[in-house]
Image: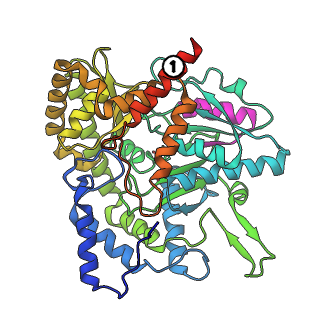
Amino acid sequence: MDHLQLPAQGRNPDEVLTDLSRFRAKDPDYKAGKLWSLVYHLDEEHDDFLADAYRQYSSANGLNPAAFQSLKQMESQVISVMAGLLNGGPDTCGVMTAGGTESCLMAVKCYRDMAAKTRRVSRPNMVLPATAHVAWFKAAEYFKVKIRLLPVGKDLATDISKLARKIDGNTVMVLGSAPEYPHGTIDPIAEMGRIAAEKGVPMHVDACVGAFILPFMEKNGHDLPEWDFRVPGVTSISGDIHKYGYAAKGASAILYRDLDTLKHQMFVYQDWPGGVFASPAMLGTRPGGAYAAAWATLQKFGEDGYCDLARRTIAAVDAIKEGIDGIDGLKILGAPQGPLLAYGASDKALSIFAVADQLAAKGWSVNRVQNPDGIHAMVTARHLEVVETYLSDLKAAVATVRANPDLARTGSAATYGMMAHVPMRGMVKAKVLDTFAAMYRAGGGALELEESGKPGLAERLMGRYVAWKARRG
Ligand SMILES: *Cc1c(COP(=O)(O)O)cnc(C)c1O
C-alpha cells in the first residue's frame, strides 16, 4: 500500500490555507442555520472574535498550572462564574476540560476511586437513566463500572420509582441530566438527589447542554424545577462552554461541591523520571486557546447577552414545537424544557426516517434518534431566522413521504430503520464497528452509508438477519 507522501518541498502557506477553505465545500452548512447539532454558530463577527481569542493562546499549554498562570487564572475565573450560575456554595471547585465527554469520564473515574478509597468498593456500579448521554456508557466501559439502568416511562421521562432499590453498597454514583440529550427532558433531579443523599451516594448532574442556558431561562422568568447545587444531594455538575456558552470547540468544565471529592479525580505520580507530575483531568497538554476563548466569550456576552441568547433560542424552540403540533402525523417526543427537542411520527404509517431523508434532500442536516424513532434538533439562537423555512420544508417532507410510503425502504431511511429495529443488537454493533473502523484506515475517507455498487449496510444487515431467522426456523 502506497501511503501519501509529504510534499517533497514545503508548500506556499497561502495555497495551503486556500486548500483548507476548499475542503469545506461539502461540509454541513452551519452558517446558514441548516445544521441542527454539532455546531453552535451565531455569526461571522462572533466566529472572528473566537478565532482572535484562540489565536492569542493557541500555543499556550495548561498542563502545568504554575507555568502559564494566565491560563490558570482564566480557568479559575470560568469555574467561579459557573459556580455562581449553578448556585454553588463557598467550597465549590472545578476543572476545565476539553469537552463534555472528558467531564463525564472524569466524574465516573472520580466517584469510582472515591468509593474504592473511602468504602472499599471493588465491584463498582452506577445508576444511569436510559436517556443518559452516550458518554456515560463510554465511561462505564472505559472504567469498568457496571450500569444499572433506570428505564423511561410512557412519557419518555426517567422512571425513578426503583431508584432507591437499585442503589446498593457498590453504587458509586447516581446520574441525572439537565436536560437529557435524546429528548431534552430534565430529569427529576430534586427527587433523585434526595434519594441519593439518603443512601449516602454522590449524585452528578449532566448539564453539558443546560449549564449555559437553563440559568438564563430562569432569569428570563421560566419556571424550571431545581436541578443544580441548590439540590442538597447534588455533588457535582458538568457543563459545556462549547455548546450553549458559544465558546470555541474544546471547552467544558466539571464542578464539585467540595475539594475532598475533586481530589479523587486528580492524578499524581511523584516518582516519574520526568519529574513529579500532577494533573487534574484526562489530558496531558491542555489547549490554552480553547480556555482563553471560553473565558473571553463569557466576558463578551455577560449576563444580558446570555439572557438574550436564551430568549431567542427558546423563541425558536417554541415556534418549532408549535409548527410540529400543527403538522398532522408528527408529535414531540417526551417533554423538552430547554433548547433541544426530538419529534417522531404519531401515525404508524409514517416513516420519520424517510421524512429525515426528505429534509436532507433540501439541505438540512438532521440527526436521527431511535427507540422511539425521531428527528433531533439542538436549537440555537441562530435558528430563529430559519424556523419558518424549516417548518415549511418539514410539512412538504411529510406530505412527500405520505404519498410515497416506499421511501421508508430505500436510502438511508432503510439503513437507519434497520439499525434501530433489527433485534440482534450484537450484530448491529459488529457491523457498525466494521464500517466505522474502516474509515480509520490511513488515507481513508468519510463514512458512506451506501457505498456505490456494493450492497449497503442495510442490505448486509438484512441479509444477516434473514439468515439468522432461517437458522432459528
Ligand atoms: C454533548 C453532551 C455530552 C458530551 O459532550 P461532548 O462535548 O460532545 O464530548 C455529554 N452530555 C450531554 C447531555 C451532552 O449533550
Q: Which residues are magenta?
A: 188-204
* Disc 1 crowd, CA 10 A, few/some/many (<14, 14-19, 20+): few
Residue denoted by label 1: 153
**Residue 167, picture quadrant:** top right
**Of helix, strand and loop, which mostly describes the magenta segment?**
helix
| Residue nearest the viewer, comparing 189 with 447 | 447
Q: Locate residue 175, reporting x and y percent.
A: 60, 38
* Residue 434 visible in image: yes
Q: Amino acid at mark 1?
A: Gly
What residue occupies the far right of the structure in this picture? 120
Residue 454 rendering spot, x and y as whole percentages: 35, 40
Q: Residue placed farthest to the top in the image?
A: 473
**In this view of the protein, which residue sits in the foreground, 280 or 11?**
11
- Residue 336 seen by the camera: no
In the shown orientation, is residue 229 left or right of residue 418? right
182 left or right, relative to 89? left
Residue drawn where x is 29% and y is 51% of the image: 309
Assess whether residue 189 is covered by the magenta stretch: yes
